[in-house]
Image: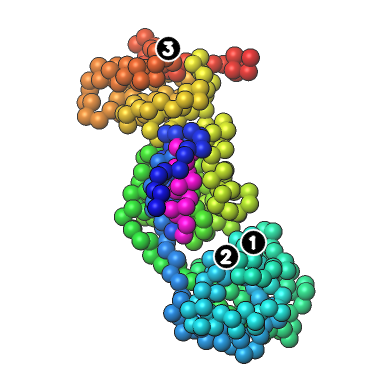
Amino acid sequence: MNTAPRPALSAALDGCTVVIAVDRRSLELAAALERHGAAVRHAPALTIVPHIDDEALIARTRELIESPPDIVVATTGVGFRGWMEAADEAGLLDDLQSAIAGAQIVARGPKARGAIQQAGFTADWVAESETSAELGDYLLAEGVRGRRVAVQHHGSGADGLDELFHAAGADVVSLTVYRWGPPPDAVAVCRSVTATAMGDVDAVLFTSAPGAAEWLAAAAREGVLDDIVGLAEAGRVLLAAVGPITAGPLVAAGIAPQIAERGRLGSLVRAVVTHFGGGHAASLPTTAGRLELRSTGAVLDGVHVPLSRTGTDILAALFAARGGVVSRQRLQGALPRSGENTHAVEMAVARVREAIGVPDLIKTVVKRGYRLNVLDPAEASA
């Protein structure tokens, strides 16, 4: 078997450290990001626990085979596929496919539609907003009274559809195909939120609302949620979601996330690549070119410049001042075990200048400190 690494697609994510707070298809997502230069850390906040051996799921499936549904509601791609797999495991797949072949099939978004197509069916309608509310409104407008409705639920539990359809006079068959379980490595999750709060992470990616909510809860438990929100507001860390539903917990926490346009992993990767490689990350116009920060250093005029942790912290303090003067005493806080030795600050700044290769990028302000050589607005637009 050929195990050679796939060729790089771009250097857009050079210097970027990306946390994947995802369980399902995390290796696929990581490989796509790495092909653009990212260093990936895995920290799924939850796991998907299949109900393959769940007697209740098989019992509900048998009920549908015996009395076929008029409507089938697919709320998630992984859930609908899991249902088909569970039926196959129980030797019921052919009978189930025959039972739902004549039903109206509706999907809560493109991933559910893809799973429906993969199973050999066609979705009759897809909720563009990817919300259960839109799906429910559509079917109520169509009319469900006296109709048998099979509802495949997502792993975070009830979404209100069972109650909604039941109240409208439908015969509802509820199917929970998977549920959310604890993270596979709780320590990795704690480390990821702490690293993000310390500026050691450039982006965190989410593909489910429960996963996003649990990652934020872990940040709150570690006492670093406010720090992460502040870094997001400053453009120092990008929190990206696969769709608007996944983004919900982030928005509720006061974060403006990047949201993938089409609700798919490929779109999520493109959104992150476009953010960092397309000039959308926080930046400053300097005499040496456009300057951006990364967790591992800087990007100057499109080229990644690796820096030590201390060097990155020094540059981050100067970057935050946006051309203003930063005192030696303040920069001293970025140096480990520097004590009152201001000479250590001078040496650290000198090392950053040497690594960047543009000594004039960091200006010495006599008796005051240092500043970045930032262009004024008129110069930057010239």
Q: What's the distance in space between the residues labelled 3 and 2, CA to CA?
A: 54 Å
Q: Which residue is mark 2?
A: 77
Of badges 1 and 3, the one in the foreground is: 1
- Give the SS element for disc 1: loop
Please state the extent of the stretch shown in magenta in the rendering. 24-37
| Residue 360, numbered label | 3
Q: Is residue 265 left or right of residue 143?
A: left
Decide: is 322 above or below 211.
Answer: above
Q: What's the distance in space between the residues labelled 1 and 3, CA to CA?
A: 52 Å
Q: Main secondary structure of the magenta part?
A: helix
Looking at the image, the residue that sits furthest to the right is: 142
- Give the SS element for disc 3: helix
Which residue is at the front of the view, 313 or 87? 87
Marks 1/2 in contact by CB < 8 Å: the verdict is yes
Residue 221 lies in quadrant: bottom left
The crowd level at tag 2 (other Cα within 10 Å; few <14, some 14-19, many 20+) is many
| Residue 252, numbered label | none
Of badges 3 and 2, the one in the foreground is: 2
Mark closest to the chain's N terminus, 3 or 2: 2
Q: Which residue is mark 1?
A: 109
Residue depicted at 34% across the width and 11% down the height: 367
The crowd level at tag 3 (other Cα within 10 Å; few <14, some 14-19, many 20+) is few
On the question of residue 33 being in view, the answer is yes
Decide: is 378 above or below 162.
Answer: above
Q: By what rule are the colours in the image chosen?
A: rainbow
Decide: is 366 above or below 10.
Answer: above
Q: Position of residue 205 (x, y in %)?
A: 48, 49
